[in-house]
Amino acid sequence: MLVTLPPGEGPTAYRTALTHLGDALPRVPARTVFVSSTGVFEGTTAERPITERDEPVAESGRSAAIRDGERAAADLFDAVVVRPAGIYGPGREFLLRRVRAGEGVDHARRTNRIHESDLVRALDLMLRMDDPPALLHAVDRKPAPLGDVVRFLAAQLGVDVPPDSGSGVPSGLVHDGSLLLSLLGTLEHPTYESGYADMIASSRIAP
């Protein structure tokens, strides 16, 4: 069973939904994968890359709710938890549209992402492999300041670089994707340049 749920309202929304799901099922599935988010680390501060060994410090309400959902999935279904970073790909073109519109972004914010094709591969593997890890961070091989990303996109799209709306002080986290890479072997889009260039070349957003 693959569980993908929106956050819902309130700190126990995930737990409530998962409890109802468990009550509705005739038995606990042989394998459950719960799709969480690296957003569970909102409020966490660290200068080094975050790995699966790091315990989230959930200071925001949103991150606390996501973390409770992870715990509920483990309690009810002994679930494997997968935490994707920012998911992008066909149909997930928010940042491309923002760059085309010239909307400001925080250039110094550290960002992580995963192309949807690689996320699908990771989820499929977690459902099928004999002894999956209990926790997996789904991130590509190139975390980057958001300014680097939008400068690349602006050049690809032939538009001006969006203005910097931040303070210039680095924020956000870098997530280590070594475990994912060791399991998949390769990523279809190991960097944002690869993934976004493919999107721009093949989608209706291309100039």
Image: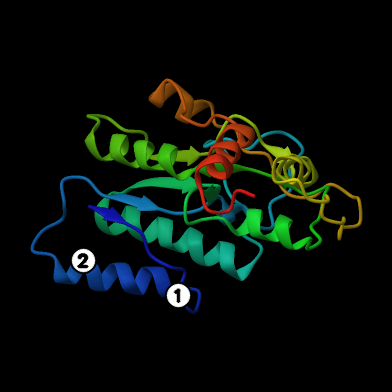
The quarter holding residue 183 reads top left
Element carrying mark 1: loop
In the rendered image, residue 169, in percent from the top left (x then y), is placed at: 89, 50
In the rendered image, residue 95, in percent from the top left (x then y), is placed at: 65, 55
* Closer mark to the observer between disc 1 and disc 2: 1
Residue 193 against residue 17 in the figure, above or below? above
Q: Earlier in the sequence, mark 1 or mark 2?
A: 1
Left or right: 206 as drawn, with respect to 133: right
The structure's colour scheme is rainbow
Residue pictured at 22% horizontal, 29% vertical: 130
How many numbered marks appear?
2
Residue projecting furthest to the left: 26
Relative to the observer, which residue lies in front, 93 or 128? Answer: 93
* Residue type, mark 2 in image: Gly
The quarter holding residue 98 reads bottom right
Q: Which mark is residue 189?
A: none
Q: What is the distance, in whole Å, between disc 1 and disc 2 at their CAs? A: 17 Å
The quarter holding residue 184 reads top left
Element carrying mark 2: helix
* Residue type, mark 1 in image: Gly
In the rendered image, residue 71, in percent from the top left (x then y), is placed at: 40, 57
Residue pictured at 37% horizontal, 37% vertical: 122
Residue pictured at 10% horizontal, 59% vertical: 27
Check disc 1 and report the residue beneath it. 8
In the rendered image, residue 15, in percent from the top left (x then y), is placed at: 37, 69
Residue 132 against residue 27 in the figure, above or below? above
Residue 118 against residue 17 in the figure, above or below? above
Left or right: 57 as drawn, with respect to 125: right
Check disc 2 and report the residue beneath it. 22
Crowding near the residue tagged with mark 2, few <14, some 14–19, many ≥20 C-alpha atoms within 10 Å:
some
